[in-house]
Amino acid sequence: MANHASALKRIRQTKKRTDRNMARRNRVRTFVRRVEEAIASGDKEAAEAALKVAMPELHRSASKGVMRKDTASRKISRLTHRVKAVGA
């Protein structure tokens, strides 16, 4: 266990940051899951609406450092392709 005040503070900061990042990551997963469920149901309009809501969340997670920028872009790209393929 840490003995120095600075080490104790780092532990508190790390826990706070970890909790925030996990909440953001779970939020992104929820939005992505909604898009995938809409794709699976075959409802193109619902899938497009869900994607429209999920895209800013993915970008936000990238800007906050939860995931890398190219990872978010790749996920958005793949979801977009899948949404376009619905009903085609």
Image: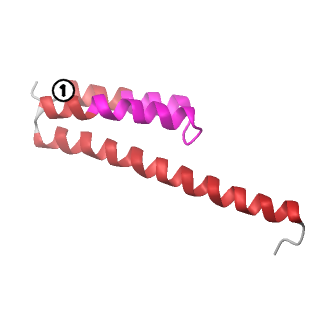
Question: Residue 51 occupies which quadrant of the picture?
Answer: top left
Which residue was labeled with disc 1? 85
Where residue 58 appears, x then y in whole percent?
43, 35
Where residue 23 appears, x then y in whole percent?
48, 53
Disc 1: CA contacts within 10 A as few (<14), some (14-19) or many (>=20)? few
Residue beneath the point at 17% across and 40% down: 38
Q: Nearer the viewer, residue 75 or 50?
A: 50
Where residue 65 appears, x then y in whole percent?
59, 38
Q: Is residue 80 left or right of residue 64?
A: left
Residue beneath the point at 56% across and 32% down: 63
Name which residue type carries label 1: Ala
Q: Is residue 67 left or right of residue 29?
A: right
- What count of labels does the image hold? 1
Q: Nearer the viewer, residue 65 or 86?
A: 65
Q: Quadrant of the N terminus?
A: bottom right
- In the image, residue 9 sits, relative to residue 88, either above or below, namely below
Secondary structure, mark 1, is: helix
Residue beneath the point at 11% across and 43% down: 41
Furthest-right residue in this view: 4
Residue beneath the point at 45% across and 27% down: 73
Question: Residue 47 occupies which quadrant of the picture?
Answer: top left
Where residue 18 appears, x then y in whole percent?
60, 56
Furthest-bottom residue in this view: 1
- Tell me, yes or no, whether the highlighted magenta stretch contains residue 53: yes
Q: Is residue 63 left or right of residue 73?
A: right
- In the image, residue 28 sits, relative to residue 22, either above or below, namely above
- Tell me, yes or no, whether the highlighted magenta stretch contains residue 71: yes
Q: Which residues are magenta?
A: 51-76
Query: Would you say the magenta stretch is mainly helix, strand or loop?
Result: helix
Q: Quadrant of the C terminus?
A: top left
- In the image, residue 1 sits, relative to residue 57, either above or below, namely below
Q: How is the image coloured?
A: secondary structure
